[in-house]
Amino acid sequence: MAPGSALHHTHSRLRRPLLSRRSTKLRRRWWRYLGLALLLSTEALGKQIQRERGEPVEHQHGLSCPLLSKPRPLLHLSMRIHRRRKSTTSLRRCSGGARSPDVVEREYADLNLKPMYGVSNVTFLSFNTKNWGEEQMGHVRIRQHVNPLSSSFTAPVQVPEWKEVFRDSTLPLMVDIGCGSGRFLIWLAKNSVEPRNYLGLEIRQKLVQRSQFWVKELGLENIYFLFANVSVSFDQLVSSYPGSLKLVSILCPDPHFKKRHHKRRVVQAPLVDSISKNLSLGGQVLLQSDVLEVASDMRDQFDAYSDVFEHVDHIDSNFLCDAEGWLLHNPMGIRTEREIHAELEGARIYRRMYQKTKQPS
């Protein structure tokens, strides 16, 4: 096939779509690296020019080079990295110089979890590698956002033997949906004076493994953490529990801000319907978020079951609300980690608590 012939050009056009997405991503990545290299070399050249002119050299991150008075398209990656580092630092450094991890450690000091952070001789089945291995049960790296609609989370979880999980499986049950690190629920299980069992459901398995490790180290027999997709497994889990379901908490769930991702939010009509059927009479539901849009969406979902649920301030005058119906105080006695971080940043926490007054028709 001679180069330049019509057959050669036709063959080339047919081959072009066969380039994989991986090679395209690699090319884009190399262009980004090139932009970063250009930024560093040009900034160094700018500093050299400043030295030759006898001008003071500014030692700072960002675009201090006089040759770069306007941003260039190839440099957007490094500029974005710099802005991200700056914003992350501002998130960690809260008002008064306090950092949210330090405040969390102080509020949960009676759990004494810090000595367990360095433990590494814990054997478990890794979710990513599917191999037995060892990992430190302290600071674990996790994905902040998980797609519950992914095919890897569609299989229902196996219902545990409740008699083996809890010392007394007939006690009333509290379920925390999206329990995160588990500190909040562990604190309740350790300090609550009311006899009750606690079940934490979390879709990120590494957090569940660490929470269960903490429970065993603390010797608690009234709490259990389970790796589960609530959208798939909630109904079969709570319906199989021998005791009564007294409290369900959904605290600061993943907001999934993009409109096309709203279907990934945990509070959907099937879950609300399952809670309305399985919650015992007099049982309560606590909703909480630092994002008004998410809190309003959860409120609307439960307000649609007004024949089953009633807001607690209509039943108990001790629960005070503002003009819009949001609870003014945390009724649980301890703040969640997300709640601590949001309030240190100056954000408001929006809460609603419902009580089941009638059985669904």
Image (cartoon, rainbow, N blue to C red):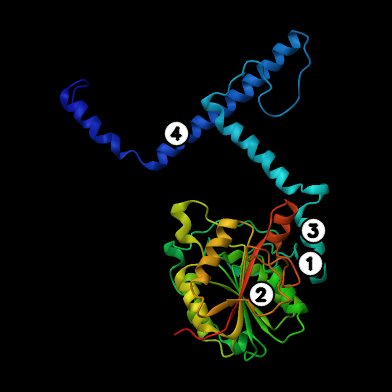
Q: Residues under labels 3 and 4: Cα distance?
A: 44 Å
- What separation in Å lies between label 4 and label 1 (alpha carbons)? 48 Å
Q: Nearer the viewer, residue 337 or 249?
A: 249
The residues bearing labels 1 and 3 have C-alpha atoms spaced at a distance of 9 Å
Apparent side of residue 117 relative to residue 135 in the rendered image (left or right): right
Query: Tag 1 or tag 4, which sits nearer the N-term?
Result: 4
CA gap between label 2 and label 3 equals 30 Å
- Residue identifier under label 2: 313
Q: Is residue 294 left or right of residue 58?
A: left
Residue of label 3: 103
> Three-letter amino acid code at disc 3?
Val
Q: Amino acid at mark 1?
A: Tyr
Label 2 vs label 1: CA separation? Answer: 29 Å
Marks 1 and 3 in Cβ contact (< 8 Å)? no
Q: Which residue is mark 1?
A: 108
Q: Residue at x 61, y 87 (%)?
A: 164
Q: Quadrant where the C terminus lies?
A: bottom left
| Cβ–Cβ under 8 Å for marks 2 and 1 | no
Disc 2 marks a residue whose amino acid type is Asp
Note whether 116 is above or below 160 in the view shown: above
The residue lying at 69 percent from left, 53 percent from top is 347
Left or right of 101: which side holds 157?
A: left
> Counting residues from the N terminus, which is met first, the one under dot 1 or under dot 3?
3
> Residue 19 is drawn in which quadrant?
top left
Q: Which mark is residue 27?
A: 4
Say few, some or many: other residues with alpha carbon within 10 Å of mark 1 (under 14 / 14 to 19 / 20 or more): some
